[in-house]
């Protein structure tokens, strides 16, 4: 019986993306969506106590209703 | 009456005061004390650790076949942008202080990283990279590179403010030979950064580097540690 490979090989590896230098130039531009995503990610990896602090600050900053 | 300094979502526990620290700005705590660079570095490390864990999961996804190589590469490209944006914004004192020029500088760093990633992905596709623990570790270096961007931004900013000399300081329990060599050189002209003085992130320990920099104005002897 064949032994499994020492290095596990994936089932779905497939090809790498076919990207030219021009594609990389275009993809590397920082967009508004990139900034928003990075901000959300930074918030996600904040320790919980600071995330809570941020939420409290944001509630304080809300304008009064009416 | 003074206007309170705004909270930035990047570091809600601190505020950025742009007027202090020789005009380069610094984070201050609730009591108005300047936050140490070691603390700021620790905050950055925590964030990058979170992102590096994500990257580890993506690597596991590729290994296990949950992700195709193209899907992994696309997801990695997002992670790369995130970590360099976070590193830059952290050094600039928060998202609100990032200028168009700063975003442009991040974009150029990301462009280089995308090229390394393209080569990495092509090597994987060709079967030249075994998808073992080394693959995961190498993938995670892309996440840790956000730290290099933090120091790159600090060097640009401090150079503009007339800090014309730089020295490297060891912090790791065990440092690589490059870092030991650089720490032993003392202050060198900042113009040597990237020439004879290799930046943090490009030494043998790569993005795992725990060193920091001290910048000095040769005319006055004033120093800032980052």
Image: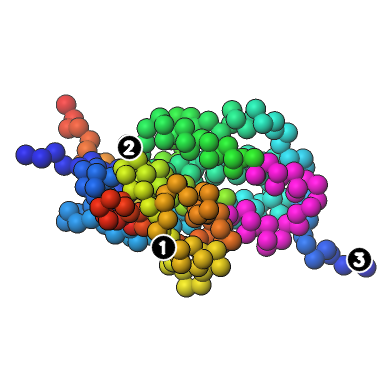
Q: Can residue B31 be seen in this view?
A: yes
- Disc number for residue B97: 2
Q: Nearer the viewer, mark 1 or mark 2?
A: 1
The residue indicated by pointer 1 is B186
- Residue extending farthest to the left is B1
Q: Nearer the viewer, mark 1 or mark 3?
A: 1
Viewer-proximal residue among B130 and B70:
B130
- Magenta stretch holds residue B123: yes
Percent x, y for residue A45? 43, 52
| B146 left or right of A18 in image | left
The residue indicated by pointer 3 is A2
- Magenta stretch holds residue B50: no
Assign a secondary structure to mark 3: loop
- Residue extending farthest to the front is B219
Percent x, y for residue B131? 73, 57
- Estimate how packed mark 1 is, as few (under 14), some (14 to 19) or many (20 or more) residues with alpha carbons within 10 Å: few
Distance between the alpha carbons at the discs numbered 1 and 3:
59 Å
Badge 1 and badge 2 in a common chain: yes
Q: What residue sits 48% from the left and 38% below the top?
A: B106
In which quadrant will I find the C terminus of chain B? bottom left
Distance between the alpha carbons at the discs numbered 2 and 3:
60 Å
Q: Give the range drawn in magenta.
A: B116-141
Percent x, y for residue A43? 39, 46
Q: In which quarter of the image is residue B6?
A: top left
Distance between the alpha carbons at the discs numbered 1 and 2:
32 Å
Q: Mark 2 lies on which chain?
A: B
Q: In this view, does B118 lie above or below B174?
A: above
């Amino acid at each position: 019986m064949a032994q499994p490979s020492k290095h596990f090989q994936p089932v779905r590896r497939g090809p790498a993306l076919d990207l030219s230098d021009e594609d990389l130039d275009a993809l590397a531009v920082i967009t508004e969506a990139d900034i928003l995503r990075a901000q959300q990610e930074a918030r996600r990896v904040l320790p919980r106590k600071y995330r809570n602090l941020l939420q409290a600050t944001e509630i304080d900053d809300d304008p009064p209703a009416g | 009456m003074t206007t309170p300094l705004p909270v930035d979502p990047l570091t809600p526990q601190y505020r950025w005061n742009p007027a202090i620290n020789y005009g380069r700005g610094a984070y201050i705590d609730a009591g108005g004390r300047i936050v140490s660079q070691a603390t700021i570095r620790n905050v950055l490390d925590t964030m990058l650790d979170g992102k590096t864990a994500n990257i580890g999961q993506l690597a596991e996804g590729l290994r296990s076949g949950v992700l195709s190589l193209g899907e992994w590469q696309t997801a990695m490209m997002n992670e790369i942008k995130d970590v360099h944006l976070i590193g830059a914004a952290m050094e600039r004192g928060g998202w609100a202080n990032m200028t168009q020029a700063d975003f442009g500088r991040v974009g150029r760093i990301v462009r280089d990283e995308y090229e390394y990633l393209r080569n990495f992905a092509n090597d994987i596709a060709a079967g030249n990279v075994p998808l073992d623990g080394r693959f995961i570790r190498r993938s995670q270096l892309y996440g840790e590179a956000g730290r290099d961007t933090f120091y790159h931004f600090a060097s640009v900013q401090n150079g503009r403010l007339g800090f014309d000399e730089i020295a490297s300081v060891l912090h790791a329990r065990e440092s690589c030979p490059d870092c030991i060599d650089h720490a032993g050189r003392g202050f060198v002209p900042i113009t040597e950064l990237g020439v004879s003085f290799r930046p943090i992130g490009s030494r043998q320990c790569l993005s795992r580097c725990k060193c920091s920099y001290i910048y000095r104005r040769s005319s006055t002897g004033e120093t800032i540690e980052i």
